[in-house]
Image: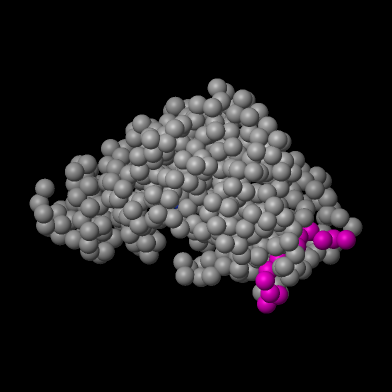
Amino acid sequence: MSTSGKINAVDLIVRKREKGELSSLEITSLVNGYTLGDIPDYQMAAFLMAAFLNGMNEAEMVALTEAMLHSGSVLDLSDIPGKKVDKHSTGGVGDKVSIPLAAIVAACGVGVPMISGRGLGHTGGTLDKLESIPGFSTQMDIGAYRRQLADIGVVMIGQTAEIAPADKKLYALRDVTGTVEFIPFIAASILSKKIAEGIDALVLDVKCGSGAFMQNEADARQLAETLVQIGERFDKPTVALLTDMDQPLGRRVGNWPEIAESVQCLRGDGPEDLMEVTLALAAEMLLAGGVAESLEEGQELSSQCIDDGRAMEKFVRLVESQGGDPDAVRNPETMDEQAHTADIRAPENSAGTVARIDARIVGRAMITLGAGRTTKEDDVDPLAGITLLVKQGERVPSSGVIARIHASSEDRFAATEELVTSAFEFAETVSDPGSRLIDRYSNGHWVNP
Ligand code: URA
């Protein structure tokens, strides 16, 4: 392979433009050249668009994932006893599942090394949620990450410079060149970061519906299949659940409000839909981690460790280990009470039950309120959020109050209220919200969960 990235890059761009295939070595040289700065943004942008328009086959996707994975450190956690399993969600509105899930799974004896991202756009990020706990730090070097995992079985941090640096650079370029929504790039981006964490197996929550990255079910299925196939090519047992994100998950949206609802979950008092998704993913992780022999057993073990308080205690230990205030999570009401609130009422003459709450509109309302970001530099208000007091299939109370908004100040309340109201659809007849679990993909097959 030539050492001149520029000459190579043009050949490779032209080949992709003409719908040709690139070898694994060529893809590696492209990714390495770009990460090291030998290939400029304009050439990589041209390659990204050519690939976006003409597609990549499985061998190319594997090579891209491999090159991105090895652009930084690939952690080896094999000296820490037991299996380590992580979960990745494609994200959604009210999706705080990682927080109770990590505590439940670790309390059941499977290690959870979790490296997460920040929220951008209408979906929230696990890091922003965790950082709403006073004192909680998501920055840690790899030595401390390993020690905490060995010590308490769970660690939740942000992306470090050592993990898949190619992804960081490529994602920023994709973001400004219209090349984000392409399954091979999404799969390589997610898997390179997750495999670099040192996991033994991976569970994916691929969401579809109005509040999801993939709004269309066919696209979400294709992403799930691709992620599982590529994950397996790296000898990491990978399974995907396809879950519904047409409506917000749980009743609370926003950073601190989602921590408070996660605590409710860990106390066995979480909303039904959130518990359903959390326990289904926990069962998958316990099965993959070798602690349960079946998904049924995984669900039972997860429920037991919630009922006997181990899951909540594990969460408190996680918070303490990362510098957070344990009293804040033991008594979430105290932080909630610091927020200003306003009630939102159903429009006059609306029908008596909630037929649907559009997750995407709730996500937009969350940004308006100051709980989300439109650019990476935006600050978030940790207390800002929305509580959905009535959800699909429930009756509007006689007071007419359907939601409550919370924030550190009331400045943005007026702009948010109308948006929250517009997310609600009403009907006379009660509709059954049904299950949030749509399907499960593993070993090349879809099987309803
Ligand atoms: N999440 C990621 O980590 N990468 C993508 O490309 C898309 C979503």
Residue range corresponding to the magenta coloring: 399-411
Q: Is residue 284 visible?
A: no
Q: Residue at x 35, y 57 (%)?
A: 161
Residue furthest to the bottom: 411
Magenta-span inclusion, residue 404? yes
219 sits to left or right of 253: left
The one of 300 and 252 positioned closer to us in this rendering: 300
Looking at the picture, tell me which residue is in the foreground, 58 or 322. 322
Q: Position of residue 384 (x, y in %)?
A: 65, 65
Farthest residue, direction right:
398
Q: Position of residue 13 (x, y in %)?
A: 21, 54
Is 428 a magenta residue?
no
Which residue is rendered at x = 31% and y = 54% of the image? 166
Above or below, 73 against 435 in this view is below
Q: Residue at x 83, y 54 (%)?
A: 396
* Left or right: where 40 falls relative to 383: left
Q: Nearer the viewer, residue 401 or 169?
A: 169
Q: Residue furthest left?
A: 2
In the image, is residue 149 above or below residue 133?
above
As drawn, 34 above or below 15: below
Q: How is the image coloured?
A: one colour
Displayed quadrant of residue 271? top right
User: As drawn, is 62 to the left or to the right of 432?
Assistant: left
Residue drawn 23% across the image and 47% down it? 27
Residue nearer the viewer, 363 or 136: 136
Q: Position of residue 338 (x, y in %)?
A: 72, 67
Is residue 382 in view from this perspective?
yes
Q: Quadrant of the C terminus?
A: top right
